[in-house]
Amino acid sequence: MTGPATTCELKLKKMDLSLSSLRIIRPIQLERMQESLKRFGQLNPIILRRQEAHYQILDGFKRFYSAERLGWEHLQAMILDIPITQGKAMMLNYNKVSRSLLDYDEALVVHSLSREHMLDQVMISNLTGYSRSWVCRRLGMIDKLSESVQQHLRMGVISNTHARFIVRLPRGNQEIITRIIIDNNISSRDSQVLIDKFLASSTLKQQQYVISHPMEVIQMALEGNEIHDSRLSQHGNRLLKSIELLLIQNNIFTGQFTHYQSNKLKAKELGILSGRLERLEKSTGRILSILEKNKTRI
């Protein structure tokens, strides 16, 4: 820091949003922040760095956008006199404790320090306080993740955890696997299983089978794993296995039923499925009844 921090009430129109491209902000996050500002007011100052006649936001983008929506003209601000590279490093450090930054947000900041300011990994490590291996992983997330997958991530179509697994794939295979994950509503845990199976495929034919039968591949992989906990009795382990298998089937059913193709089923198909769905509803009711009775015991 090259000068003391100053606090003041600052007009929103004087705040510079140029670093907002290094943050992903979901609509639900803005809704929560807006509600918080309405109920409790501003609890923490927005952090900015002085930049000529304007002030560049480092931390507090959600507060800014929410205040703007509420029609506020001012926010409490803490203004720092620091260079831009230190400002970007502080974007990481201000969110370190709360973990409000996703891996991808962190990767955007690190990538910016590398590409825009020509800092090498050692320099970034010294500046941010993170290890060189951490810096290397964050850079890899941008360099190795295809632009189309990054776009899905920015839009919230896939999660940060999905992206951690997808980045392990060759760039040429990332989009097709991502599309499978999206179309089948595959959870991050199951996406790891799918990607592991794809990477373990030694032939093009095996890879094609994974692509063509993703849910079956996931189910077979998970059912093949030994589900056991040494702390449980024999019956306890049977219950554990039945719970895990039920969760797997539930995951598959949810993914298939929410697939866009379900809206295109013909009346005859719906008629055939309706009886099975009624049985499923009754079975689900029994499961809920069992869970309700055992709430106090488990």
Image (cartoon, rainbow, N blue to C red):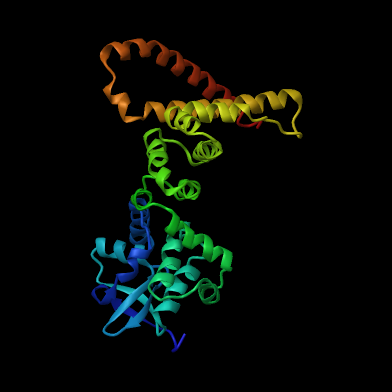
Which residue is more in the foreground, 277 or 119?
A: 119
Q: Quadrant of residue 15?
A: bottom left
Instruction: Determine whether 107 is above or below 169 in the image.
Output: below
The residue positioned 50% from the left and 70% from the top of the image is 93
Residue 90 in the figure: left or right of residue 262: right
- Residue 27 visible in the displayed image: yes
Instruction: Determine whether 267 is above or below 51 in the image.
Output: above
Instruction: Determine whether 271 is above or below 261 in the image.
Output: above
The residue positioned 26% from the left and 68% from the top of the image is 72
Which residue is more in the foreground, 204 or 70?
A: 204
Where is residue 49 shown, x and y percent of the image? 37, 79
The residue positioned 52% from the left and 66% from the top of the image is 135
Where is residue 178 shown, x and y percent of the image? 40, 41
Where is residue 108 shown, x and y percent of the image? 41, 63
The residue positioned 43% from the left and 47% from the top of the image is 159
Where is residue 181 shown, x and y percent of the image? 42, 38
Instruction: Determine whether 150 is above or below 271 in the image.
Output: below
- Numbered-mark total: 0
Q: Quadrant of residue 73?
A: bottom left
Give the residue furthest to the bottom.
3
Residue 250 in the figure: left or right of residue 31: right
Residue 222 in the figure: left or right of residue 8: right
- Residue 70 visible in the displayed image: no
Quadrant, the C terminus: top right
